[in-house]
Image (cartoon, rainbow, N blue to C red):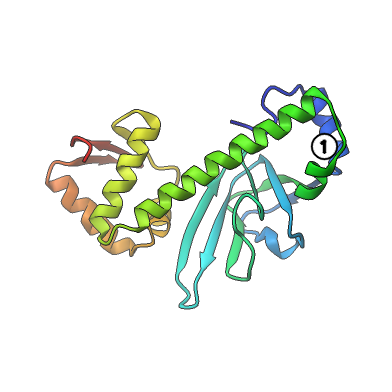
Amino acid sequence: MQVFENISERNKKILLRNFEATRLFYRKNSNILQNIKSDSLVGIIVYGSLQIIKTDYNGDRSLIEELEENDIFGTIISHIRGNEYEVITKEDTMLYILDYNQIMNLNLNTDSYNQFIKNLLQITSSKMQEKNERIEILTKKTIRNRLLEYFNIARSNHGSRVIYLPSTFTDLADYLAIDRCAMTRELKYLKEEGLIEIKGRRITLLYDKV
């Protein structure tokens, strides 16, 4: 689902003009929140990719979300308020920055605007489901159980035993809030026990869902 799905390019441009969207470009490894001061930010990725990172008081980093081209994020959609959060570009990235309050308060009654709001609400609902899935993963006490829960959710969402990691194994460890070396050892054990196969970022599940 994309926020401009079922909206023509012409109507997309009209909407962006009505939203008073700002187009911004960031180099790789930029923290975009340093330059954006808004409590109702909505960002749309035109091209590129970024990560939402949280650093706790111990200095431990957790990967909150991976975002790619056409994904959206924001202070309303993702909880990124506070100094502990960073939104870091993984490559050169262009964004549209919009104000959520302005989007919702526009007095527009057009098919394209109504479609945009419908898409936005569906994406927000999907992101809430993803957050609930991550909470379920983090309730698991052991590294093995967090990995298995992550694999089971990915299998259910994609309907396949073959899982492709969206990023690196280091990012996966950050997402699961576990030590990278300890996770590597556990993956090795799972592989030796015949439960998974690993080839690059492709993981094949050889066990029935538990």
Residue at x-position 42% and y-position 51% = 134
Residue at x-position 85% and y-position 40% = 106
Task: Find disc 1 in the rendering and name its residue.
Answer: 16
Say if residue 151 shows up in the picture. yes
Residue 162 falls left or right of residue 4: left
- Going by the numbered disc 1, the residue's amino acid type is Leu
**Which residue, as the protein is rendered here, is positioned at the far bottom?**
58
Q: Position of residue 192 (x, y in %)?
A: 13, 47
**Which residue, as the protein is rendered here, is positioned at the far left?**
193
Q: Is residue 76 above or below residue 13?
A: below
| 3 and 200: which is toward the camera | 3
Residue at x-position 16% and y-position 52% = 189
Q: Quadrant of residue 80?
A: bottom right
- For the C terminus, the image quarter is top left
Q: Secondary structure at mark 1?
A: helix
Residue at x-position 84% and y-position 41% = 19
Q: Position of residue 154 (x, y in %)?
A: 36, 39
